[in-house]
Image (cartoon, grey):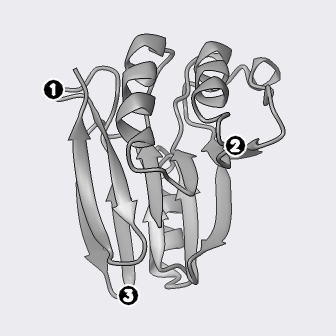
Amino acid sequence: MHLALLSDTHGNVTRTARAIAALKAFHPVHVIHAGDIGSAAVLTELAAGFADPETPITCVLGNVDTYIDDLVSPVHFLSIPGSLATLTLAGQSIAVLHGHDTRRLDAVIASASYDLVITGHTHLAADERHGRTRIINPGALHRAQQPGCAILDLATDHLTFLPIA
């Protein structure tokens, strides 16, 4: 049971397409985009890339996603709940937020209400723990020294960072 993680695409459709190809190889049960989507074209690419089979996609808004009216889901299996998403997968409670609001990010982590917090913003891949909460930043697909995304096996808790050229 794999969870596909990406962030900080900043409208880079080419790298988003490459990330989709790398992530699809794991047959994820859910896709999470941790913000700074950057354009409606990225949403269209995600929707097309995970349409067969339909894979649920959850995207949160980041600090560059100020044009909310342009970020409308092109399909029913892609949701954009705003700046914070919460979901439960494989018995794990998950919070997703971009991380540019560090007070909010710190509060979500400190609440100890989540098994997993997925974040972005720093453009640096990271995997940390704070008490029972695991914090994962999959890295960035745009303006990153090593562009990449990540795949998390929810059954084994194994995280793999995937470099994307």
* Residue 28 at x, y percent in the picture: 50, 53
User: Taking 66 as reference, is 132 left or right?
Assistant: left
Q: In the rendered structure, which amino acid carries the disc numbered 3?
A: Arg
Count of labels in the image? 3
Residue visible at 64% across and 24% down? 48
Mark 1: secondary structure: loop
Label 3 environment density (alpha carbons within 10 Å; few <14, some 14–19, many ≥20): few
Quarter occupied by residue 20? top left
Is residue 88 visible in the rendered image? The answer is yes
- Looking at marks 1 and 3 on the same chain, the residue that comes earlier in the sequence is marked by 3
Residue visible at 43% across and 48% down? 5
- Looking at marks 3 and 2 on the same chain, the residue that comes earlier in the sequence is marked by 2
Q: Which residue has dot 1 on it?
A: 145
> Foreground mark, 3 or 2?
2
Mark 3: secondary structure: loop
Is residue 125 visible in the rendered image? The answer is no
Q: Is residue 1 above or below residue 20?
A: below
Asked whether the residues under the numbered discs 2 and 1 touch, taking CB atoms below 8 Å apart as contact, a structural biologist would say no
Q: CA distance from mark 1 to mark 3?
A: 30 Å
* Residue 27 at x, y percent in the picture: 47, 50
Q: Which residue has dot 3 on it?
A: 132
User: Taking 128 as reference, is 50 left or right?
Assistant: right
Residue visible at 55% across and 32% down? 63
Q: In the rendered structure, which amino acid carries the disc numbered 2?
A: Glu
Q: In the rendered structure, which amino acid carries the disc numbered 1?
A: Gln
Front residue of this view, candidates 58 and 3: 3
Q: CA distance from mark 3 to mark 2?
A: 32 Å
Front residue of this view, candidates 14 and 107: 14
Q: Is residue 58 above or below residue 103?
A: above
Q: Which residue has dot 2 on it?
A: 54
